[in-house]
Image (cartoon, grey):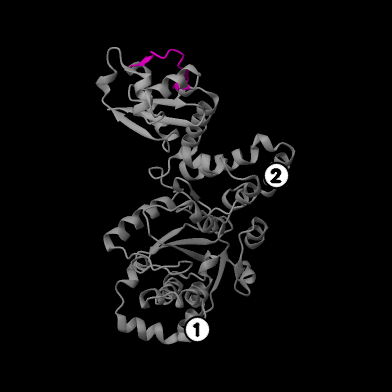
């Protein structure tokens, strides 16, 4: 399949400029996508355009990842109800560094079509305002700009001149990359269509050239929850923000109605492989084979094979009742969303601490009486061990690596006890 055929089959081609098919077929092209440095990490919602760049590269084109060190000082109004809080240069620079490091996991920076990095701070923070207004602003009328959806949707609720100017800044990015690096294609999310076509228009008017763009759909899920958001917050690509275990579980818990689309969007699996997984899911939905394939593929892509295997071991230990197989770090990742308490390690010396007292201190029971009744009912575990004696105590020996222990009440209530 051609690049666009592949994108269409995967469901990630939302709109495109006329004659883009011919432009791609005529030879190797340079295409870019911008990434907004509002944080020092990308999140899973960024994976659609990231994979778009990677797919371009695999089809023989050169990708350029443009980090918005300049536009990040302004903030893109597209798809936003309110104006963003402006960041300092220091914040933006730190975020740019983090994003660049992550993009290197997806794009090949060596070889014939080696990926390139660019930062629009290089030109947006150095061009004089009068030059920008003369060379860029004169090509756009107020009517043209207010007709764009990203502007139109915000005019009534309030749009500052700062945000209003964002379209021109992004159009100028396209012009600079066109002139300096030969970029003729820009891609992005569907909310970027107005900004992208403003760039093609600026290239036509200011440079007498022709450029193209295509956009991808904003990912949604069948349950109506915003993609990439969970009760615990955003799913980040940074392992320090979202552990590989929780990252793996996010994909493994994909709804049956979403998983096939996600396999198309976020993995390198081919059509026959995905169709086989779809057939298996329809025949044996309880096996969650498609979800497992999705979780393994995306976690490996983002965090590597070793982290994926560790996440799978942690899952087997948790759901198979073998927590003793995990070290203290893995336990902390598995139960990172569980309440935790810190207690002095020396309290666990000698006879240790009574489980009844620990249940109350950890907030799993409201009183010692409730703790006794729960133990008598067989509903308390320390790690994998069921507590059968109401006088049971725990010592450092019960803590994994002498540092962490898992206290359970029933099937759903868990607390992590950290010895400090």
Q: Residue at x 44, y 45 (%)?
A: 232
Q: List x then y, in percent, for residue 278.
A: 70, 44
Q: Residue at x 63, y 49 (%)?
A: 258
Q: Which residues are magenta?
A: 380-395
Q: List x then y, in percent, for residue 350.
A: 27, 12
Question: Which residue lies most toward the front here?
Answer: 369
Name the quadrant of the C terminus.
Answer: top left
**Residue under circle 1?**
144
Q: Secondary structure under badge 2?
A: helix
Q: Secondary structure under badge 1?
A: helix
Crowding around mark 2 (Cα neighbors within 10 Å: few <14, some 14 to 19, many 20+) is some
Q: Quadrant of residue 241?
A: top left
From the viewer's side, name the closer residue of 130 and 153.
153
Q: Is residue 394 magenta?
A: yes
Q: Residue at x 27, y 59 (%)?
A: 90
- Taking 75 as reference, is 20 left or right? right
Compared with 292, 7 (above or below) is below
From the viewer's side, name the closer residue of 114 and 97.
97
The earlier-in-sequence mark between 1 and 2 is 1
Residue 11 appears anywhere in the view:
yes
Q: List x then y, in percent, for residue 163.
A: 39, 73
- Taking 225 as reference, is 323 left or right? left
Mark on residue 278? 2
- Taking 402 as reference, is 228 left or right? right
Mark on residue 419? none
Q: Count how many numbered circles sit on residues in the image.
A: 2
Compared with 123, 309 (above or below) is above
**How far is disc 1 from disc 2 in space, using C-alphas?**
45 Å
Name the quadrant of the N terminus.
Answer: bottom right
From the viewer's side, name the closer residue of 54 and 340.
340
Compared with 136, 382 (above or below) is above
């Amino acid at each position: 399949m051609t690049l666009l055929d592949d994108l269409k089959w995967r469901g990630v081609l939302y709109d495109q400029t006329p004659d883009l098919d011919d432009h791609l077929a005529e030879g190797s092209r340079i295409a870019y996508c911008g990434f907004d440095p509002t944080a020092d990490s990308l999140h899973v919602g960024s994976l659609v355009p990231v994979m778009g760049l990677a797919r371009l590269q695999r089809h023989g084109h050169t990708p350029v990842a443009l980090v918005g060190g300049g536009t990040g000082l302004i903030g893109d109004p597209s798809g936003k109800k309110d104006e963003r809080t402006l960041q300092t240069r220091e914040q933006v620079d730190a975020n740019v560094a983090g994003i660049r490091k992550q993009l290197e996991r997806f794009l090949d920076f060596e070889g014939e079509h080696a990926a390139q990095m660019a930062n629009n701070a290089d030109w947006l923070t150095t061009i004089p305002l009068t030059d920008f207004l003369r060379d860029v602003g004169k090509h756009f009328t107020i009517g043209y700009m207010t007709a764009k959806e990203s502007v139109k949707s915000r005019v009534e609720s309030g749009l500052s001149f700062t945000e209003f100017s964002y379209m021109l800044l992004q159009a100028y990015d396209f012009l600079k990359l066109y002139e300096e690096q030969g970029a003729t294609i820009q891609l992005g999310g569907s909310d970027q269509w107005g900004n992208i076509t403003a760039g093609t228009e600026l290239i036509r008017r200011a440079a007498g050239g022709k450029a193209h763009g295509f956009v991808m759909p904003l990912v949604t899920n069948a349950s109506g929850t915003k993609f990439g958001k969970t009760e615990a917050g955003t799913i980040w690509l940074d392992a320090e923000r979202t552990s590989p275990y929780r990252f793996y579980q996010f994909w493994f818990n994909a709804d049956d109605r979403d998983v096939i689309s996600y396999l198309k969007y976020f993995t390198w699996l081919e059509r026959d492989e995905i169709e086989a997984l779809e057939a298996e899911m329809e025949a044996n939905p309880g096996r969650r084979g498609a979800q497992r394939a999705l979780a393994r593929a995306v976690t490996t892509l983002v965090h590597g094979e070793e982290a994926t295997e560790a996440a799978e071991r942690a899952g087997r230990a948790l759901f198979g009742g073998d927590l003793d197989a995990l070290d203290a770090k893995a336990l902390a990742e598995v139960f990172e969303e569980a309440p935790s308490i810190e207690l002095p390690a020396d309290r666990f010396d000698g006879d240790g601490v009574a489980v009844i007292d620990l249940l109350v201190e950890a907030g799993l029971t409201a009183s010692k009486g409730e703790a006794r009744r729960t133990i008598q009912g067989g509903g308390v575990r320390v790690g994998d061990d069921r507590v059968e004696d109401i006088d049971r105590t725990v010592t450092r020996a019960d803590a994994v690596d002498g540092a962490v222990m898992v206290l359970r009440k029933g099937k759903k209530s868990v607390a992590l006890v950290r010895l400090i």
